[in-house]
Image: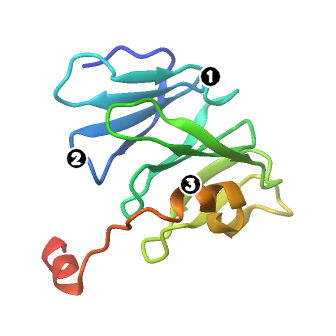
C-alpha cells in the first residue's frame, strides 16, 4: 500500500516494466511506483493544475507517457526506469476538459483523445507532428510484437 496526496483518479501499469505503475490524482500529482517497494520512486507535484483524467504509457516507444487533465491539457512526458519523467510538450486540443486519451496499438505516436466541448469533443492526432516530440522519441528503438506473440497473448 502507498500513501498519496489526493484521490487516485487514474492508474496505468508500465507494459515495458511490469513491476512499475503510475498513479494520477485528483490534485494533479503523478506518482511512479514500483510494486516491489514500499514508497513511490518519484512524485511530480502539480503535474497538472486539476485532476488527472487520462494516463497512458506506451507499449511500443520506451519512455513515452501521456497524461490528460481537467485543466484542458494533454502532456507528453519522457521517463526512464526509476527516474522522474521530464515534460516534453504540453498541448491544448481546444476540447475543454479532457476526459480520456489512448495511444493507437498499431501506430505508436497516434493519440486519440476526447473532451467535453460539444463542438470539438474528439480528435486523433499524430504526436510526430510536434517537432520536439519527434526529435526526442523519433530515434528510439520501437518494441513490436509478431502475430504469433499476439495470438499467444489472447
For the C terminus, the image quarter is bottom left
Circle nearer the viewer, 3 or 1: 3
Q: Nearer the viewer, residue 133 or 21?
A: 133
* 33 displayed left or right of 101: left
What residue appears at the point 49 percent right and 75 percent down from the top-left corner? 107
Return the x and y of residue 71 as percentages of the image width and height: 73, 36
Pointer 2: what residue?
18
Q: Kindly give the residue lying farthest to the left in the view shown.
A: 152
Packing grade of label 3 (10 A; few <14, some 14-19, many >=20) is some
Give the residue at mark 1.
46
Element at badge 1?
loop
Circle 3 sits in a helix, a strand or a loop, which is it? helix
Residue at 16 percent across and 84 percent down: it is: 148
Sequence-wise first label, 3 or 1: 1
Mark 3–mark 1 CB contact (< 8 Å): no
Mark 1 Cα-neighbour bin, 10 Å: few <14, some 14–19, many ≥20 = some
x, y percent for residue 51 = 61, 31
Q: Nearer the viewer, residue 99 or 66?
A: 66
Q: CA distance from mark 2 to mark 3?
A: 23 Å
Left or right, residue 132 beside residue 15: right
Q: Residue at x 26, y 75 (%)?
A: 145
The numbered mark, 2 or 3, whose residue comes first in the sequence reads: 2
Q: Secondary structure at mark 2?
A: loop
For the residue pair 81 and 73, the one nearer the viewer reads as 81
Q: Position of residue 79 (x, y in %)?
A: 44, 41
Farthest bottom residue in view:
147
**Residues under labels 3 and 1: Cα distance?**
23 Å
Q: Which mark is residue 136?
A: 3
Query: In which quarter of the view is residue 11 placed?
Result: top left
Mark 2 touches mark 1? (CB < 8 Å): no
Q: Position of residue 36 (x, y in %)?
A: 16, 28
Q: Nearer the viewer, mark 2 or mark 3?
A: 3
Amino acid at each position: 500500500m502507498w500513501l498519496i496526496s489526493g484521490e487516485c483518479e487514474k492508474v496505468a501499469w508500465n507494459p515495458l516494466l511490469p513491476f512499475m505503475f503510475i498513479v494520477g490524482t485528483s490534485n494533479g500529482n503523478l506518482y511512479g511506483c514500483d510494486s516491489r517497494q514500499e514508497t513511490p520512486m518519484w512524485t511530480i507535484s502539480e503535474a497538472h493544475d486539476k485532476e488527472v483524467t487520462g494516463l497512458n504509457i506506451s507499449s511500443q516507444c520506451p519512455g513515452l507517457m501521456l497524461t490528460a487533465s481537467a485543466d484542458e491539457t494533454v502532456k507528453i512526458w519522457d521517463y526512464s526506469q526509476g527516474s522522474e519523467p521530464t515534460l516534453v510538450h504540453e498541448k491544448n486540443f481546444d476540447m475543454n476538459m479532457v476526459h480520456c486519451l489512448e495511444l493507437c496499438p498499431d501506430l505508436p505516436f497516434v493519440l486519440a483523445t476526447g473532451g467535453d466541448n460539444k463542438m470539438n469533443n474528439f480528435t486523433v492526432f499524430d504526436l510526430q507532428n510536434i517537432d520536439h516530440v519527434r526529435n526526442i522519441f523519433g530515434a528510439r528503438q520501437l518494441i513490436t510484437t509478431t502475430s504469433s506473440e499476439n495470438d499467444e497473448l489472447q
